[in-house]
Amino acid sequence: MEKKNEKQQAPKGNMPKFNLSWLYMIIAMMLIGLWMTNEAGNTSREISYDEFQQHVRNGYINKVIGYDDNTVEAFIKPEHVKDVFKNDSNRVGRSPFVITEAPARENLGNFLEKERELSHFDGSINYKRKQNFWGALFWQIFPIALIIGFWIFISRRMSGGGGGGGLGGGIFSVGKSKAQLFEKGGATRVTFKDVAGLAEAKQEVEEIVEFLKEPQKYTDLGGKIPKGALLVGPPGTGKTLLAKAVAGEANVPFFSLAGSDFVEMFVGVGASRVRDLFRQAKEKAPCIIFIDEIDAVGRARAKAAAMGGNDERENTLNQLLTEMDGFGSNSGIIILAATNRVDVLDKALLRAGRFDRQIHVDLPDLNERKEVFGVHLRPIKIDSSVEIDLLARQTPGFSGADIANVCNEAALIAARHGKKYVSKQDFLDAVDRIVGGLEKKTKITTEAERRSIAIHEAGHASISWLLEHANPLIKVTIVPRGRALGAAWYLPEERQITTKEQMLDEMCATLGGRAAEDLFLGRISTGAMNDLERVTKQAYGMTAYLGMSDALPNLCYYNNDEYSFNRPYSEKTAELIDAEVKKMVNEQYERAKQILSDNKEGHNRLAQLLIEKEVIFAEDVEAIFGPRPWASRSAEVMDANKISAELKRAEEQQEERAEETEKEIKEKEESNATKE
Ligand code: ADP
Ligand code: ZN
C-alpha cells in the first residue's frame, strides 16, 4: 500500500538536531526584530507640563494632540529637534514628539489659544480618544502574524505540501526525504511475472532477491552482497517496474524517489534528505531504495573547485556516497538506481562497494514486445481478431511504457465506439496515434531507417566473423539502445596483452558499419559516430602510447602527470601522429570495404535476416558464413576494449588508483558482454 513518509513515527529519544528549520527560525526572528525597531523609529520623550509650555513659547511645536485621559503629544518642528532631543538628536526618526500630562483639557486649550494670539504657536490642535490597549496591541501583532503566516505558507508549498498538520508538516519537513514507501505485502505487489522480457536483467537481480529473502545464508558464510546496482536504459523500459518486482519477490518494503527530489533551492536540504532517507530505510531493513534518474544528483563533480559548479548538488552527492559507505553490506539495504546516462555519472558512484554493477534494461525487441503485450493485454477484453504477433511487428522501437499506452488507448477507442470487445483495428489506430505523438521525441524508426541500421550492423557482424583476431560475436540487434541505433555484443576473451593484429582487426570490424553503408547504400549516415570515435581514440592510442605505428615505432608519449597540460612531444611529432592516425584508419576502412564487397551476398542475407528478426545470434551468422576456421585463440591477449577504455581514461587524465582500475575493469567485463 502506498503510504507517505510524514505519517511515520519519528524514532524515540532523538535529540533535536541543529537542522535547517532552526536557521530559518533565526532569520525570521531577525526580520521581525528589524521590523519592530523600525516601527519604533519615532522617538518620544516624557516631559513635564512646564517644559512643554516652555517649548510652546519657544515656538518649537507644530502639532498637538490632546487625549481624553489628558495626555498630550506634541510634535516637534524638524528645525528644533536638536533643541529638544539634545544628545540623541540624530536617532529620533521622522517625526519625534514629546509626551506630557495636562492638568485638564480646558487648561491645555486655553494655554494654546493664548500662545497662538502671541504667535508663539502656529500648529494644529487635535483632540482624540485614547486607543485602548488591546487595539494598539492588535495593530502591533497583526503584521507579525501576517509575516509568519506567509512564511509558513511558502515553506509548506516548497516542501510539497501535504502531510502532518500545522507547523510540523511545513517548515520542519523541508529536510525530510520525499521517498514514497511501499510496504511489503501490499495489494499492489509487483512480481517478476508483471515484468515482461528483460530476461538478462531479471537474472542479474535474482541474486539480490535471494539475499533479501535469506540474508543469513550469505552472511553466515561471510559473503558480501553488492550495496547497489545501476539500472541503465531509456525511459519507460521498466526500470522502476523491475526494482519494484525485486522488492515484491523478496517481500520487503520499497522506498521510491527521484534524484531530483533531493535537489531543492535551499542549501543543505539535499544532504539532510539523504540522511533522513537512510535513517528511515535502516528502520525498515531489509528493504530496497529506488532512486530514479540518479543523474540529477550523481553528475560528475566539477574537477577543479575553482571552476565553481553546483555546490548543493555536490554536497548531496557526497552525502549519498558517505551513507553508502557507512552501512555495512550486511545491513540489508540495497539501493537500486536508474539512469539513462551512465557516462555523466561521477566515477566515485561507480566504484567498488557502491553502484559497482550495471544492469542494462533496453528497449524490447520483437519477442520481448510480444511478452509485454501479453502482460498488458491480460486485463483487456479482446476479440479473436487481435494477434499479438502482428502488434509486436507494428511497434518497433516502442518501450514497455509505450506498449502499455497502446493497450490503454485501444481500450479507450473501442469504448468510444461503444464496442463490447477491443478489436485489432482499435489497436492499429492506437499505434498510429501513439507513433504520431512519439515520433518527435523518441527513437521510433521508419522502415528505411531500419534497413539502413540493419546494413550497418550486418557490416560489423560480417567483418568480425570473417577476421581471425576479432572478438567472437554473441548477438546483434537493430533495436535502438541508448544513443546507439543498433548494437552488437562480443565475447571478450580473458586476455592480458593484445597484439597489433588484434587491434587492427577490431578497428576494421568497428569501421565495418560505415563501410557497409557506403558500399551498399551509396551514402553514409550519422549512425557511425560512436564507431568513429572509438576508432580514432584507438588509433591515437596505438600511435602515441603503444608505439605501434610505422613512423613512430617504440615510442610512448603517455603523460600521467595530471596537472601538466604540455604535450611531451614537439609540434612536428604531433603532426606526424595525426598523419599516422589518418593513415591507419584509412587503411582499415579500405580493408573493411574490400572484405565486404568480397562477401557481398553473405552480408546482404545477414542484413535481411536482421530486418526480419531484429535480433540475431552467432548461430545465424554461422549458418550464413559457415564456421570460423580459426582455432580458439591464445589466452594471453588483451581485449581491445580494455586498452581503449584505459586510453580514454589516460586522456581524461583522471587520477585513479591502479588496483581499483584493475578491479573495476575486470568486474565490468565479467558482468557485461562488451558492447558496440
Ligand atoms: P522506467 O522506470 O524505465 O522509466 P517504468 O518502470 O516506470 O519505466 O515503466 C512504466 C510502465 O511501462 C510500467 O508501469 C509498465 O506498465 C510498463 N512497462 C515498461 N516496461 C515493461 C515491461 N518490461 N513489462 C511490462 N510492463 C512494462
Ligand atoms: Zn556501428
Image (tube, rainbow, N blue to C red):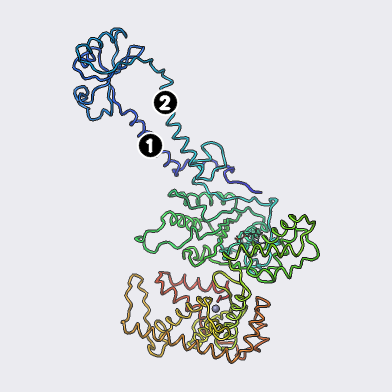
Q: SS at mark 2?
A: helix
Q: Nearer the viewer, residue 265 or 68?
A: 68
Where residue 246 sits in the image (x, y, percent)? Answer: 64, 60
Image height of 15 relative to 511, above or below: above
* Whether the residue under disc 2 has CB within 8 Å of ligand 1: no
Spot occupied by residue 335 in the image (x, y as percentages of width and height): 56, 58
Q: Which image quadrant for residue 453?
A: bottom right
Residue visible at 44% across and 75% down?
A: 648
Q: Earlier in the sequence, mark 1 or mark 2?
A: 1
| Amino acid at the residue labelled 1 | Leu
| Nearest to the observer: residue 397 or residue 306 | 397
Q: How many marks?
A: 2
Left of 298 or right of it: where is 577? left
- The quadrant of the picture showing ligand 1 is bottom right
Q: Position of residue 189 (x, y in %)?
A: 69, 54
Mark 1 to mark 2 CA distance (whole Å): 18 Å
> For the residue carrying disc 1, how many other residues have a C-alpha within 10 Å: few (<14), some (14-19), or many (20+)?
few
What residue is pinned by disc 2? 139
Mark carried by residue 31? 1
Could one spot residue 447 in this view of the protein?
yes
Question: Residue shown at 43%/61% (left/top)?
Answer: 301
Secondary structure of the residue carrying numbered label 1: helix
Query: Measured along the vertical axis of the image, is residue 44 above or below residue 172?
Result: above
